[in-house]
Image (cartoon, coloured by chain):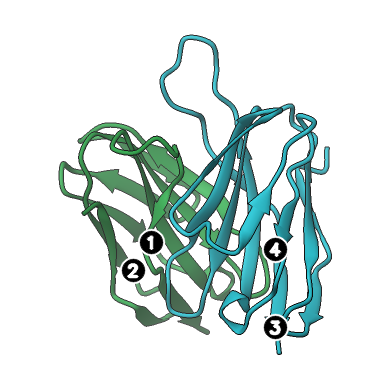
Amino acid sequence: NAGVTQTPKFRILKIGQSMTLQCTQDMNHNYMYWYRQDPGMGLKLIYYSVGAGITDKGEVPNGYNVSRSTTEDFPLRLELAAPSQTSVYFCASSYLRAGQTYTDTQYFGPGTRLTVL
Amino acid sequence: EDQVTQSPEALRLQEGESSSLNCSYTVSGLRGLFWYRQDPGKGPEFLFTLYSAGEEKEKERLKATLTKKESFLHITAPKPEDSATYLCAALYSGGGADGLTFGKGTHLIIQP
């Protein structure tokens, strides 16, 4: 059971380039999330998904896009990279049980460290 | 505005010297208060979830407690391997995102 996996671990982009950060979970969780972590700041929610085909914006969605075609995968797309997107990106997942109004514990992946120059 | 504030920002202790980390929150409709441990270059690792005031949970040298305004992470007789950044996060009913609101963390160093 690998939990939440992310690729790549590190990436350097030039301004204006695009890339996709990959996230996969094998826990059959219905909820998935993308956060970014900047030095000295708390993690901020970018986008989340409550199930395949359903996504919604978090606190800081500008400059990013997501899709969720399967339960396991939740890729994050950067279309036109900017220096402000230099950060560490974490994917997380959790499970909402039938009859519950909020999800269980969120489990995090190891992160992708992205630098935009 | 819903907020989570952690203090101190950094704490240096001698091995065996017990202390507490604080997490205060001003969120409406708290659903859960989470503690995570984060090692350098790694993702947050889940430690505890607390759901209601008065609740306590323990794991080895760590004990988490919750009141209506704050949570404490007590560390008893710490060892160097307890050195890490400890993150506090709140899940609240105010927004539709169901995401966690994180504090900035407490960077804990245990010196041998």
Please tell me the numbered disc located at residue A116: 3
* CA distance for labels 1 and 2: 5 Å
Instruction: Tell me, by letter, which chain the rendering colours cyan.
Output: A
Check whether the beta carbons of the residues at disc 2 and disc 4 lie within 8 A of each other: no
**Label 1 belongs to which residue?**
B76
Quick one: quadrant of the N terminus of chain B?
bottom left
Chain holding disc 2: B
The answer, for residue B9, to whether it is visible in the render is yes
**Label 2 belongs to which residue?**
B18
Q: Secondary structure at mark 4?
A: loop
**Label 4 belongs to which residue?**
A111
Camera-side mark, 4 or 3: 3
Image quadrant assignment for residue B43: bottom right
In this image, A84 relative to A113: left or right?
left
B31 over A9 or under it: above or below: above
Q: Position of residue A57 (x, y in %)?
A: 51, 46
Camera-side mark, 4 or 1: 4
The mark nearer the N terminus, 1 or 2, is 2
